Image (tube, rainbow, N blue to C red):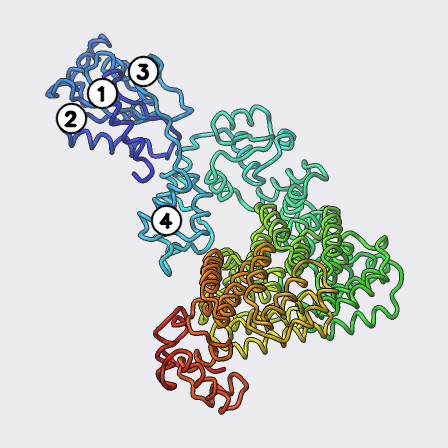
Amino acid sequence: MIGRDHEIGEITRALADDSVRGIALAGKAGVGKSRLAREAVAAAAASGWTVRSIAATATSSPIPLGAFWQWTDHVESVPFALARRVIEGLTDGAQPGRLAVFVDDAHLLDDLSALVLHQLVQSRAAAVILTVRTGEAAPAAVTALWKDGLLRRRELEPLTRKQIDHLLAATLGAAPDRLCADKLWHLTRGNVLFLRQLVEQENQAGRMVTRRGAVRWHGDTAISGSLAELVDSQIGAIAGDVRDVVDLVAVCEPIDWHCLRLIAEAGAIEAAEQRELIRTSDGEVYVGHPLYAEVRLNRCGSSRLRRLRGQIATAMKDGGGAAAVVKRGLLWLESDLPPEPDVLLSAATAASSLLDYETAERLFAAAAATGIGARARIPLAYSLLMRAKSELALEVLDGVEVDEEAQSGFINEVVMRASNLLWGMRSPKRSWRLIDDALKTASGAGRQQLLVFRAYQLALAARPVEVLATMAEVDHYDLDWYGATVGYGTETIAHGELGQPDQAVAKAIDAYYALTLSEQGKFLRQPATEYHTFALVAAGRIPEALEVAERNRRAQRAEPAEVRAVAAEILGMVTLAAGDLTAALRELPKGIDEELADNFNVVNSFHRFHLLRAQALARSGDTDAADRALSTARAHRHPAYVYVTSTELLTEAWLAAARSRLTEARRLAREAADFAREHDQFAREVWCLQTAVQFDDTDAAERLAELAGIVQGPRAALAARYAAAVAADDGGELDWASAEFEVMGDMLAAADAAGQAAAAYRRAGRAGSAMTAAARAQRLATVCGGATSPAIEAASFAPPFSNRELEIAVLVAQGLTNREIADAVSLSVRTVESHIYRASSKAGVSGRSALGEMMRRRGPLSSRFDARGPQLQ
């Protein structure tokens, strides 16, 4: 009765309502009318009602009073007298006003039985609960019951998806996993009778099992004899031409209505629709219920199915939307028609445009088998690459006979070989050499495509200046739209790295436009959006980046899972930059979904986005999870993606900072900045140096001041002034920097700057200002989702330690020896001892042990200490 509480209450109220004498439950077969009515009748009996139950059947309907045979003890010649005797028998022994009569399938009553039922209600001799099947003709005496207002009529709908999920969890003892629930919903559509039969048969067959607290369904759906009989009983006997209509629709569901009219009789279509064996919606025809299609397809032999597919494929028109073109190609491929290269090639191209590379692979392979050569084999290699089948892609390319025309598009033999080497074989050097050799002899449009690919190689290799120089050689008029999209996206990367966000945005907009005209490049929208949002975030235009990322996420809701996954990752990147740790951890990938493990985009993006997840975990204070995430990301590092090296170094820096290893954190942030500087990644260099300043680096101000004259956007100038404030230990300037970071949208930096302001004020003896800044740091940390960092935690620490004294005191509390501390912070043991002495004096404690105990006992810094002791790398 899960999901039927409202209906049970309605039946109970109808029995008690003097204005009516019961209720008629109407609905399609299998929705649970009879089960619901029996439950209500049982409740009535339990509360003292006398209950009479009648079941009308197809075999009893030709017999007068066949449904009431047990209350007819002899034959009377006058029907009304017979009816009166039955009513007397029904009411005999029942307390007045407490008789409930349940009639199941009342539409099957014979006319005289229907008259008895009508008289029972009209005379108020009994309250009646009856069920009728929607769409079936019922005797006039039955339909008059609700038409005349004697009974309420309640149309019972199938259970909703949510109700089905609850029902399955209750009956199976565990909730079904998403795939199992989706499959059961698709096949049953809330029909409880079908659901019960299907679940029982799959459980008995051992295909439905509980693992790790979830019910999983393995293997293909099998239509058992009992399930087929159940479906047949609902379909009923149908004429051959009506059956043909159902079979045609089942083969191609949904089928265009005009197409169906070309290959089926109009009368048969109408008859099938009247019987609800098919239904029409927006010009397309569907089978009345998914299981009808499953049973009919199971009953059709392979030869009949191939013939039906051929009929439909022939009747379908050329052109139409991509989905229709793919459908026609698949029907043709699986029919008795001879292979038609143009049909298969068009369908394969359409499947690729829909990012359905599995189907594209099948269709391109079939087209290639007809002998059309490079036209099919090159895009087949592309489909294989997108499915991480690099060895097969190489085999396909080895069989290509190249002509000049085949090389004029971006997806050509050379670019596919280079792409396969770069991503599939993970060999950037071999890919690079291949393009070098090809450029020596290439000319015309083919050369332009190769230059674009070379520019992309340069972008991945962190050489943005050379990217723009190479793209300056490209004549965009010689590029196809796919090549143009790649070219504009590559320029977006370069401008973003160089700190030129305005130019990056302009190129991203060009890429989006080219995408609308590209037949194959739909998946390129996500890389273009990633490069676009990074350029904005790195420049400090964070609200603008959030708007772009959120708009992109909304636009991809109806796209395949791999597109939605990357769109979520991009949003996670931007929300981390904005300081929303909760959103970042929700959107950034925890791992690679098994279903997407062979997807080109998901696999190749995982490393850099999982690094950001490790950063978010470190900033949340979960060092163990951050360490695991960093290790996982490293295991997925791709040798071609040199340009994100500084991101990995920054991730290591944040993990070191989360473990209170500030010297190590500063060193790693500086290494990241040095790498970025060496590769002209000026926007990244600013970000890396800003991070070093968040770790109390006092030597970054001069270089940041230089970068402020190179890098566009608010971040560079703000970071330069922030660095100067940290170097000067100026609480007022740090307060200002915190406010400006908040305006810019970098809430984590705002929290850190506020924490540093509090420490600076405390060292200057300005206790009130220190308390105000500390409160601000804590507020911002809370807004960020519980952010933590050395600066935030030091904000509320009372002793006026210097940054170095605080770092060493924390390491003392972690249990490190003076020698280990000296190694960790790159100082001599004697200098470490001096810092410990000064820190102990400022804290008012005597000696090293007392300092460590005090640090473990007081303040928010106590959360940093691990009972396992020091964690040296």
Residue at image point 49% right, 66% down: 758
User: Pointer 4: what residue?
Assistant: 201
Mark 2 touches mark 1? (CB < 8 Å):
yes
| Mark 2 neighbour class, 10 Å CA radius: few under 14, some 14 to 19, many 20 or more | some
Q: CA distance from mark 2 to mark 4?
A: 38 Å
Q: Amino acid at mark 2?
A: Trp
The 10 Å Cα crowd at callout 1, few under 14, some 14 to 19, many 20 or more, is many
Q: Mark 2 and mark 1: span between their CA atoms?
A: 10 Å
Please, what secondary structure does the residue beneath circle 3 have? helix
Mark toward the viewer: 2 or 4: 2
x, y percent for residue 613:
52, 64
Residue highlighted by disc 2:
49
Image quarter where the N terminus lies is top left
Q: Residue at x 73, y 70 (%)?
A: 680
Amino acid of disc 3: Leu
Which of the two labelled residues, at mark 3 and mark 2, occupies the earlier sequence position? 2
Which is more toward the observer, 771 or 825? Answer: 771
Mark nearest the camera among 4 and 1 is 1
Mark 4–mark 1 distance (CA, rounded to whole Å): 38 Å
First in residue order: circle 4 vs circle 1: 1
Front position among marks 3 and 4: 3
Give the mark nearest the N terminus, 3 or 4: 3
Query: Is the residue 836 above or below the residue 857 in the image?
Result: below
Check disc 1 and report the residue beneath it.
127
Q: CA distance from mark 3 to mark 2?
A: 22 Å
> Of the residues shown, which amino acid type is indicated by label 1?
Ala
Left or right: 446 with respect to 180?
A: right
The residue identified by callout 3 is 145
The secondary structure type at the circle numbered 4 is: helix
In terms of depth relative to the viewer, which is nearer, 621 or 105? 621
